[in-house]
Amino acid sequence: MHDSESDVICHYDHTTPFAVLLVRETISEVHWKILSYISYIGCGLSAFFTALSLMIYVFHRNNRMDYSISIHVSLSGALFLLNSTFLLTEWGATVKLDWVCVLVAALMHYSLLCCFTWMAIEALHLYLLLIRVFNTFYRHYLIKLSLAGWGIPGVIVGVSLGLKDFKQFYGLTQMTMADTNQTNAICWITDDSFFYSLNLVYFTLIFIFNSGILVAVASRICKMKQAFRSNSKLGAVTKGKTWRDPQRFNDSCRGGLTVLGLTCLMGTTWGLAFLGSGYVNYPILYLFCILNSTQGFFIFLWICLSAKRQRRNDLEGKMTSTPVRSLGTKCD
């Protein structure tokens, strides 16, 4: 507690909710604590599983690895950096050297922008893979995507750091509770105008793009399922059988899970921040912290399923001896 001549400010340590990355509204003390514990548990899980994804990718990489898996792992790397720096943001605020807090804040901002950029790349790749199927071969495809995924955020943060003589955008930030005078010091963006104009505008553009791709892909999946169901039903009738409801139910569940997985992969769950802008919506904040702090874990599961599917396709390809070359498989 700090006592000055006319006011008393209480400092509250060791917890920060994940929602502060996109939400600037003040939160009551009780919800702040609960959201912070959820965020730290979720970020810890995501950091562990994203690190596991990176290790598996490095030690089991081969020349025929699917481009999609490489993009998933790149997104996992960005999430690992984001979760790790988020867990360090309060430690950085306690260090006396000012440049340490500035570095932690800049790294967290860079990793956040990298996550958004790689989510947009996930949507772009999915569009090329499922919607624009033909004429989709590009030389050095993954290198170009990597330059965009890691380079664009680097330019933004680098320029922001370069303007430190004009305005210091990164450093110690005090987060105040809504119902008390307690504050929590973290290393983050210090200027509200910079926070809203860059973070939210950048994410808004990506959110609109990814949402459009998600709708188009979900529609395409429904059409493919309907065509497959019609063919299966026709084949069953010719054999004197009927299309059973359990099979239709299973197909619908698989389609729904695929769409949910793509929703997580493209980061559209981060759009929950829009529902709480301008006022505090606690159910939305809880969903935001739970879904987005654990995003790395869900992407790890998606990578495992994708790798399993690729092994099955490779085995079928060897049996039929008819390899298929497209954006799905490296062919530089």
Image: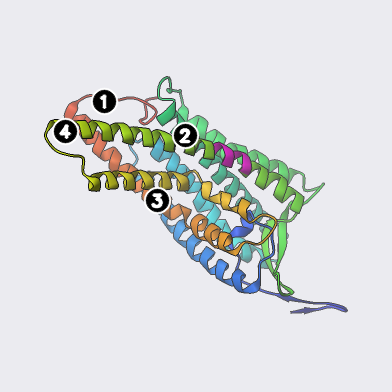
What residue is shown with label 3? 300
Q: Residue furthest left?
A: 240
What residue is shown with label 1? 323
Kind of residue at badge 2: Ala
- Mark 4, other Cα within 10 Å: few <14 / some 14–19 / many ≥20: few
Which quadrant of the figure contains the C terminus? top left
Question: Is 184 on the left-hand or right-hand side of 221?
Answer: right
State how far apart marks 2 and 4 are (Cα). 32 Å
Residue 170: give x, y in percent of width and height.
71, 53
Q: Earlier in the sequence, mark 1 or mark 4?
A: 4
Residue 217: give x, y in percent of width and height.
44, 35
From the image, state whether disc 3 or disc 4 is nearer to you: 4
Residue drawn at (56%, 67%), measured in percent from left and top? 35
**Residue 261 visible in the snapshot:** yes
Asked whether the beta carbons under mark 1 and mark 3 sit within 8 Å of each other, the answer is: no
Question: Is 166 on the left-hand or right-hand side of 135?
Answer: right
Kind of residue at badge 3: Phe
Q: Any magenta on residue 205?
A: yes
Kind of residue at badge 1: Pro
Q: Residue furthest right?
A: 5
Quarter location, residue 239: top left
Instruction: Tell me which segment is drawn in magenta.
Output: 204-210
What residue is shown with label 4? 237
Asked whether the beta carbons under mark 1 and mark 4 sit within 8 Å of each other, the answer is: no
- Mark 3, other Cα within 10 Å: few <14 / some 14–19 / many ≥20: many
Residue 59: give x, y in percent of width and height.
34, 45
From the image, state whether disc 1 or disc 4 is nearer to you: 4
Q: Secondary structure at mark 1?
A: loop
Disc assigned to residue 216: 2
